[in-house]
Image: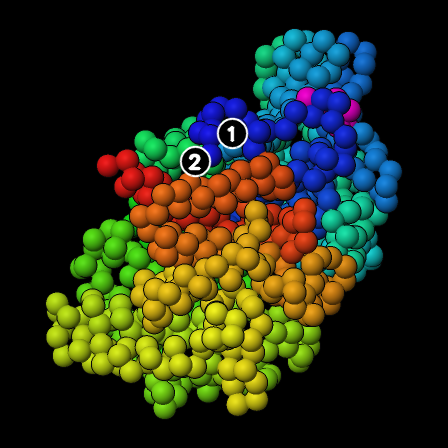
Amino acid sequence: MTPLNSTETRLDATSVNCDGADIDSLLAREWLISNSLGAFASGTAAGCNTRRYHGLLIAAANPPVGRMMMLSTVMEHVEIDGETYELATNEFDGVFSPRGVALLEKCVCQAAVTFTYRLGGATLVKDILLAESANAVTLRYTLHGWDGAMILSPFAAIRDFHQLRHAEPENRLAFTITDSGTIIQDEANPTHTLHLVGHGGQFQPAPEWWYNCFYRNEAIRRQDANEDIYRPGTFNYKLSDGQSCYFTASLNEPVNFDFDSTLRRKTEFREELTASLGPNAEDTDALLAIGSDAFIVQRSFPNSASSTSILAGFHWFADWGRDAFIALPGLLLTTGQFARARKVFNTFARHLSADGMIPNCFDDYGASPHYNSIDASLWFIIAAERYVQASGDTVFWKDTLLAVCDTILRSYREGTSFDIHADADGLLTGGSDKTQLTWMDAALGEETVTPRYGKAVEINALWCSAHRIMADRCRGSDRELGEHYANLADTMTPAFERLFWNDDSQCLYDCINDEIIDASIRPNQIFAVSLPYSPLSPYQQRAIVDVVKHHLLTPRGLRTLTPEDPNYKGLYEGSPASRDKAYHQGTVWAWLIGPFIEAYLKTHTGEPGAVAQAERWLAGFDEHLAEAGMGHVSEIFDGDPPHRPRGCIAQAWSTAELLRARALVRAGKEATQR
């Protein structure tokens, strides 16, 4: 892959030249900024909201969840020398009004989001910045080349971010004037208030509803796509050439933060993240590292200090245990953030259940964890091993991680929730036809789309690897415990090969229970090669990589099912039910590129051209960083070409595994050059 020019590539991924661009292309590019609470702001390069999740302040009332759409948008018009310019763009079922996108020259998403408008002979620059640790956003407007007047019309929703607001009597919004602006609340549900501060702008009451704002991405997903939003009035400013004005919105209380110092700190931290990758990192690595910070958040628990967690994705996912520990090595270890990694381990370790399970997720509306995953606990152990390898921190292993890992494996072996237990052959089994415990967990009511109960291949690859990890890590400190785990690993390793090896297909069965032997060609088998310890021979490992490469590899990750299977779904589209049926039946998942690249490099060590080939495969993501979420990696893609991005525009494990895979390639290149 040709080295990327840092300035040019970063501009392509995080900047859109809007002048003369087709509006549909601008609506397809989405920007996102977030803060340590899990609050965020997001929209499109056109300045028009296309999702229920687009807005200028989506606050985290119970960090990092309890998220509320507080401020949907601010519509602006500027008066210069007798001319009036409308900057906002809104869609109403195919009709855009106003159409400020016609004035838009550029949209740039970095530490702040910046829109540049050409207003005749003048230029107006609009910057959007979130506070670092508060549910607050500030908009800064700077006029260049002329004097003028600006009128801001803030529109509120004040709703759960999953819902939409409609202007019915029981959902009335009302405002109260303050010395600095106004406060808006829902009279039917006054739990949260939106504070608007004009910072010198004069507030003029002019309450008004705008009806049936159309969100085209919701319509594409066959969901309610119309919303009513509320304006309490306007904020009026006078601007001289070169002068800036500010407008702040915040949750439940007025929040003032210094715009320039906040922007400087955010920018400096982004520079630290890129520097952490080392001198041989390319611009794509820097973009991924910068994007990785969006997912690292504070988590609040009642009567305890806040801790650190990892959000699974934007716009709608919270923190999930499986996602967190798959993502942790890429997000935090490749960037050398070992202290934050320890805090994430501690967050989940403190909530280890009595029967040895790491939370699958925390509740969106409370602190109670849910324990309905067979693999989150096993991924904790893999992440723990990768943490020690990266940091050399054996103290944290001995003081914290060892006991948690031992409890997990002992509890699983003896039997825990969902009938998870070690079978007579030492392998792990669990679940039933009514449960979805693996990462392929789509369900339609009580119907499981991909039933994978019993002995799933990646679960047992994790199980075998976890025992080898414990055997090796314990030998130096607890010889007896180390030998115990080594003996267990010696028993299950040949059992894994006997049970899962499919000699006819030269790969692994996907799942086996009393009713079926599932020979579907899926990506789950790649973990039997990529994880720190493999239970297979070198020949078998290489054969698996070849099968996965032939059937599942795409420029955006691995398909979840071979196109040759009659159950394959090549497009992730349509109704929620249609999408769920395709979610793990052919849809491409970006995060799977990490284990594939790792497995490929393991099985082709020392071969000429292997590292270069891996690098070429990863290059398929370079253009994607400028395709959907600006500078971010999407959750999923269609199985069929051209592999359109779908799902979340920014997914933690997608970013993380691409970062980790690129680090493996860099290490391989450096090794060949020595």
Quarter of the figure that contains the C terminus: top left
Q: CA distance from mark 2 to mark 1?
A: 9 Å
Residue 605 placement, left or right of 39: left
Q: Is residue 218 visible?
A: yes
Q: Which residues are magenta?
A: 100-105
The residue singled out by tag 1 in the image is 10
Q: Amino acid at mark 1?
A: Arg
Instruction: Depth check: give the residue in front, 450 or 296.
Output: 450
Label 1 secondary element: helix
| Residue 101 belongs to the span the image colors magenta | yes
- Residue 286 shows which numbered tag? 2
**Circle 2/circle 1 CB separation < 8 Å:** yes
Residue 203 higher or lower than 32, as above or below: above
Q: Residue at x 77, y 30 (%)?
A: 22
Residue 279 higher or lower than 668, as above or below: above
| Residue 130 belongs to the span the image colors magenta | no
